[in-house]
Image (cartoon, rainbow, N blue to C red):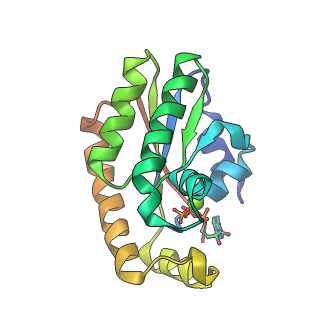
Amino acid sequence: MTTTQTRALDAVRTAGDLVAVIGASASGKTTLLAAAGIPSHQIVSLDRLRAAVSEPGDQSATPDAVLLQHHLLTMRLRRGLTTYVDNTSTEAAHRLQLVELAHQHGCRAVAIHLDLPLPDCLARNARRAAEARVPEDVLRYQHRMARAARDLLPREGWDEIRHHRTGH
Ligand SMILES: Nc1ncnc2c1ncn2[C@@H]1O[C@H](COP(=O)(O)OP(=O)(O)OP(=O)(O)O)[C@@H](O)[C@H]1O
Ligand SMILES: [Mg+2]
């Protein structure tokens, strides 16, 4: 992990921000948050919430996880607590919900857009344990959506947008 990667998060750390790390699976979101020393209680992730209400990887638990995520974010933002959202957030509709929620609570919405070339993403995904691996077609789709997000973010109401190219 390089210093640049950690700095991408340091610079946006403001009390009460909602910080969404946006990027395809295996683009390095969770690794970046860990390297920046973000305490796990400040991180909300649908993966973890799915595992909390069911078993890791159970996609059918998504609606319950989304509900929990909404409650958690609401409660933390209401208290003015900085919260990091560690989901792919490659769908515009999901990002807009985050921006709206932050603004409803008078908080800033910060986007950190991770950009990793597709071959690197595919390679990292392939090196993962089978249960953590995303099907290749899904990853290619997410990567396309993440690239599209780069152009969409400025029109989505984010208070701050940072682009971060993760290492190889
Ligand atoms: N800068 C880096 N250099 C090399 N390998 C990295 C780097 N960042 C992450 N990785 C590796 O890439 C893989 C994916 O990283 P990570 O789990 O952080 O991705 P993610 O974006 O959180 O994915 P997901 O959306 O599936 O949770 C991991 O095996 C991790 O060790
Ligand atoms: Mg992750």
Q: Which residue is drawn at 64% across and 81% down?
A: 129
The foreground one among 168 and 15 is 15
Q: In which quarter of the image is the N terminus?
A: bottom right
Q: Quadrant of the C terminus?
A: bottom right
Up-down: is 117 above or below 119?
A: above
- What percent of the width, then of the height, locates residue 79? 59, 16
- What percent of the width, then of the height, locates residue 137? 34, 81
Total numbered labels placed on residues in the image = 0
Up-down: is 30 above or below 94?
A: below
From where the camera sits, is residue 38 visible? no
Up-down: is 41 above or below 129?
A: above
- What percent of the width, then of the height, locates residue 48? 60, 54
Answer with left or right where residue 142 lies relative to residue 168.
left
Q: Residue at x 71, y 51 (%)?
A: 34
Q: Quadrant of residue 83?
A: top right
Q: In which quarter of the image is residue 155?
A: top left
| Ligand 2 lies in quarter | bottom right
Answer with left or right where residue 60 lies relative to residue 155.
right
From where the camera sits, is residue 98 visible? yes
Q: Which residue is drawn at 64% across and 53% down?
A: 32
- What percent of the width, then of the height, locates residue 61? 46, 58
Q: Quadrant of residue 145?
A: bottom left
